[in-house]
Image (cartoon, rainbow, N blue to C red):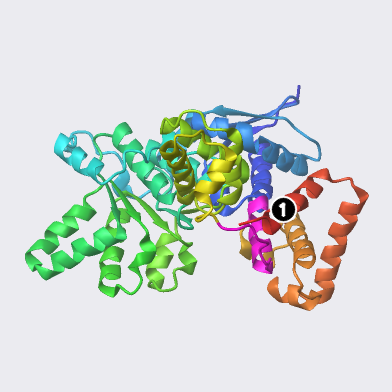
Amino acid sequence: MRTATDEQLTRIWDEAKKVLRGRLNDAAFQFWFGRALPLQLDDEAFVLGVPNDFAREWIEKRLAIKVSDALAEVLGAPVPVRVGVDERAAHLADKPADEPAAAAAPAPGAPRRPRRGALARSAALADLNPRYVFERFVVGPHNEYATAVAQSVAEAPASAYNPVFIYADTGLGKTHLIQAIAHATLEKHPDLQVRYVTVERFTDDFINAVTDKRRIEGFKQTYRQNDVLLIDDVQFLAEKQQTQVEFFHTFNALYEAGKQIVLTSDRPPRELEALEERLRSRFGQGVVVDISRPDLETRIAILRKQVTWESMGSVDPEVLEWIASRVTTNIRELHGALTRAVSFASVRNVPLTLDVAKEALRDILPKTYQRPVTAEMVMAEVAREFGLHVNDLRGNRRTQDIAHARHVAMYLTRELTDLSLPQIGARFGGRHHTTVMNGISRIERQLKDGHDPQLQDLVALVTARLRGPR
């Protein structure tokens, strides 16, 4: 049995990481493989070391195939992948090279922070919804990466992923997720000072402190002496210039002291154009994750969990599927629709059948209609399916995965919109219409020969989503 030397192993893994970088977004690559170590390569398998069981299970279940494919591209032959927990990887995760010195453990004999008192813990919990915990957060393809990042932060605050910026449209669960981090951190690390607030609360506290100058130092201590600070809806900092300045200094003070910062918004940092550039830059310097719209199966799962958590008794699965098929863009509205239907049936003292649910919700659910499809909608859906960003489809990178995704998006744009080839080229970063035509022709040939059922399924799935009812 031949075994690779340490030098060979390092060189092979370095090349494989280059391939993986082209197939994952930067945040996902750094999160899962930034601290992974190659341990062994022989005739039987490639062994990868990771910091903990959480990373091991996730890579084994969801990313091992990508690792194997990357290694096959480097080695010229397929190779099985095994993943194990290794102390050296764990050590790297605990002490990343870029971790601020202030975050290191105190030297022997140095004074330690006393454990937080019951009063401080109660104050932190008073700002949190007791229902917003990880156990009640339904995980699906639309939010699994964001959830993994959140759980990692709660396990080891400020150890590697800092700051964390979570963005999503209204009603998709970002407040639930950020509060779940707070709950879990308080539970796992009772000695840490944890504070969750909305931007509105931060602004009110700042205004009150400025009004009474004697309170400004107290305000700074309230926010800058936390080990974990979680701020919800930072987009509302827009047009609050003085508050932005104070928020910037608070952010810097915490970050430089090695404290964990978690932020949420309704859009990514680069799109917060009403905020100062230096704030947007700070927000985007860590891990940026999004929560997209849940698919039908996840929406049904969310409703099933609601039935259990709220003790609604037996609800016809047909009713859940019908509600899930009609409320597609907002989880809060999804919960509200089921609650209204159950209450309606209870007041009428009748079983909650599909007809009763339709009657209960006839005035609040949107009527089914075909959405006008745009090139931007196509790019967003295709980028999500390939784990890319829309800018990858518009940009100049030509790695195999990005080029293929770009061609799929061009093909679907041609199929689902009235845009001409030059207009499609303009949407995709100003490309010439012949480039668009070649990309579309390539996908048409692959679909026609029938040798790529995965591509056929992908095209059908994205088409159904874009043409489906809202």
The stretch of residues the image draws in magenta is 366-388
Label 1 sits on what residue type?
Ala
Rendered view: 252 above or below 103: below
Q: Is residue 195 left or right of residue 147?
A: left
State the image coordinates of residue 138 (x, y, percent, origin top left): 50, 38
Whole-percent x and y of residue 275?
38, 71
Figure check: 464 above or below 411:
above
**The one of 310 and 138 positioned closer to us in this rendering:** 310
Residue identified by numbered label 1: 464
Residue lying farthest to the left in this orientation: 214
Element at label 1: helix
Magenta includes 179? no
Q: Which quadrant does the C terminus fall into?
A: bottom right
Residue 385 located within the stretch drawn in magenta:
yes
The x, y position of residue 400, in whole percent, is 76, 55
User: At 31% across and 65% down in the image, what residue appears?
Assistant: 248
Quadrant for the N terminus in the image: top right
The image shows residue 466 at horizontal and vertical percentages of 68, 58
User: Residue at the spot x=47%, y=33% of the render?
Assistant: 307
Residue 424 appears in the picture as rendered: yes
Q: Is residue 407 above or below residue 143?
A: below
Residue at the location (23% across, 43% down)?
A: 126
* Residue 62 left/right relative to 420: left
Question: Residue 236 is drawn in which quadrant?
Answer: bottom left
